[in-house]
C-alpha cells in the first residue's frame, strides 16, 4: 500500500509539472509490441502510450534539437502457454528527445510504474507490483504525423523486493503526432 501511495504522489507531481505547456504544444499517441529476449522468450508486451510534450526545448550546435516529454503507458504482458491470462502495467516516464535531423529522434527515458496483476512468470519473477523502467530508442518520422520506432526497454524493481529478475525487451512502436 505504501508503494502505491508513492506512485500516486509521483504521478500527480509529474502531471502538475506538465500542465502549463498544454496550450503550446501537441502530443503523440502510439502502440507498441515488445518481446523479452534474455530469459523468457515467451513473454510479450502490448502497449498503448501517450507522450505529452513538456516545456524544455533547445537547439544545440545550430541543428540538434533537444526536447522533453512525459510518456504515459498502459500495457498488457502475456506469456505464451500460460492459459492466455495476462497482467497490466501502468507507468509514467519522463523522456529526453534528441533530434539530429527533423526525420530522426533519439529517445531516452527513465520512469516508474505499477503492475496490476501477476508479477511471476515462468522464467521471470519481477518481485512485486512497483517497478522502475527505462527506454532507449530511435524514432523515424514518416511524414507529417506518423512515426516508427525501435526501443530497448528494461524493467525491474531495483532491488526493493526479494526477487528482481527484471525484463529486457526489444520493442517496435507506431505513433501519430497531432
Image (cartoon, grey):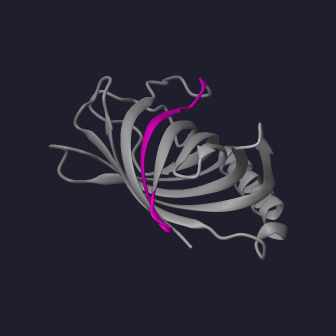
The one of 136 and 64 positioned closer to us in this rendering: 64
Q: Residue at x 57, y 39 (%)?
A: 131
Give the magenta range: 142-159
Where is residue 138? Give x, y as percent: 49, 41
User: Which residue appears farthest toward the bottom when viewing the image?
Assistant: 23
The answer to which image quadrant residue 30 occupies is: bottom left
Residue 117 colored in magenta in the image? no
Where is residue 163? Give x, y as percent: 48, 24
The one of 13 and 94 positioned closer to us in this rendering: 94
Q: Residue at x 82, y 59 (%)?
A: 17
Q: Residue at x 53, y 23 (%)?
A: 162
Where is residue 146? Give x, y as percent: 44, 64
The one of 85 and 133 positioned closer to us in this rendering: 133
The correct choice, above or below, for 8 with respect to 66 in the image is: below
Where is residue 78? Give x, y as percent: 29, 48
The correct choice, above or below, for 76 with respect to 2 in the image is: below
The answer to which image quadrant residue 9 occupies is: bottom right
Q: Residue at x 29, y 27 (%)?
A: 123
The answer to which image quadrant residue 22 occupies is: bottom right
Amino acid at each position: 500500500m505504501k508503494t502505491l501511495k508513492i506512485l500516486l504522489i509521483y504521478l500527480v507531481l509529474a502531471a502538475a509539472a506538465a500542465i502549463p505547456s498544454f496550450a503550446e504544444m501537441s502530443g503523440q499517441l502510439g502502440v507498441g509490441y515488445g518481446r523479452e529476449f534474455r530469459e523468457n522468450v515467451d513473454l510479450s508486451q502490448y502497449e498503448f502510450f501517450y507522450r505529452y510534450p513538456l516545456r524544455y526545448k533547445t537547439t544545440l550546435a545550430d541543428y540538434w534539437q533537444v526536447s522533453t516529454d512525459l510518456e504515459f503507458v498502459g500495457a498488457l504482458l502475456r506469456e505464451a502457454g500460460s492459459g492466455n491470462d495476462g497482467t497490466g502495467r501502468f507507468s509514467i516516464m519522463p523522456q529526453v528527445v534528441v533530434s539530429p535531423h527533423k526525420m530522426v529522434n533519439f529517445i531516452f527515458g527513465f520512469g516508474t510504474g505499477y503492475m496490476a496483476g501477476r508479477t511471476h512468470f515462468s522464467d521471470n519473477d519481477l518481485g512485486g507490483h512497483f517497478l522502475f523502467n527505462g527506454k532507449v530508442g530511435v524514432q523515424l518520422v514518416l511524414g507529417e504525423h506518423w512515426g516508427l520506432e525501435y526501443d530497448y526497454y528494461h524493467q525491474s524493481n531495483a532491488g526493493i523486493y526479494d526477487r528482481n529478475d527484471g525484463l529486457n525487451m526489444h520493442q517496435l512502436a507506431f505513433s501519430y503526432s497531432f
